[in-house]
Image (tube, grey):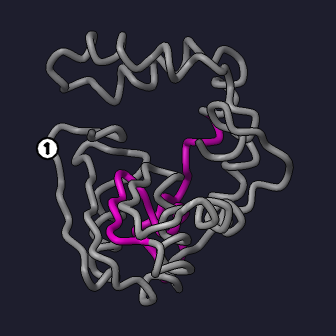
Amino acid sequence: DLPGHGDAPFTEPFDIAAVAEAFAGQIDTPAHILGWSLGGLVALYLTALYPDKIQSLCLTASFARLTADTDYPEGLAQPALGKMVGAFQQDYAKHIKQFLQLQLLHTPHSGEILNRVLPDLARCGTPSALQAALEAVNHADARPLLSLIQTPSLLVFGQKDAITPPRMGEYLHRYLSNSELVLIDKAAHAPF
């Protein structure tokens, strides 16, 4: 778990490079790393800063930078994540269920999947680091790290994802020299 998510404790600030360093300290032999969304940003830092610890990388619905800039139109001009944080803090179980229902909209057997994953996701309630992680994401920029990554990388994105749209995966694919991009039709932010 990322700090302040699930069972992992959290103390301010939410520092993406420090999280990557902590994970690197737990890896004894080269590992296969999968990072989803914010976890993918941490995985980029981990792979760039500790390449000898990573055998392969899979980024799922992730990004090098979330927000758009003049030299990065692939980012989001107005991320809606801030609005989600307020809803999650108000009633996490209700709003994480609604969020997942949207992500699974075009998925066969979505009800079964939701019933299987929701209890574990809602078990700990609102992640204590939710706001701090969002602020860290809004300021993070891993683009300078991409040229350091030579690790074989699989990039998995959903064609219907509005949080991390496919263009973010296409950007990563352009700048990660040893990458493969897979776009899943009808999938959203949880393409797996």
Q: How packed is label 1: few (under 14 Cα within 10 Å), some, or many (20 or more)? A: few
The part of the chain drawn in magenta is 54-83
Which of 75 and 14 lies nearest the eye of the viewer?
A: 14
Q: In what quadrant of the picture does the C terminus appear?
A: top left
Horizontal placement of 123 versus 153: left or right? right
Total count of labels? 1
For residue 3: magenta? no
Q: Label the magenta part by its dominant secondary structure.
A: loop
Q: Residue at x 55, y 42 (%)?
A: 80
To which quarter of the image does residue 106 belong?
A: top left
Which of 115 and 50 lies nearest the eye of the viewer?
A: 50
Q: Amino acid at mark 1?
A: Asp
Rendered view: 166 above or below 69: above
Q: In what quadrant of the picture does the N terminus appear?
A: top right
Q: Residue furthest bottom?
A: 147
- Say which residue label 1 marks: 185
Label 1's element?
loop
Q: Does residue 70 show up? A: no
Q: Residue at x 66, y 14 (%)?
A: 91
Q: Residue at x 56, y 80 (%)?
A: 49
Q: Residue at x 27, y 52 (%)?
A: 157
The spot of residue 169 in percent (x, y) is 31, 64
Q: Residue furthest right?
A: 12
The spot of residue 7 in percent (x, y) is 67, 31
Q: Does residue 187 show up? A: yes
Rendered view: 104 above or below 51: above
Horizontal placement of 130 versus 165: left or right? right
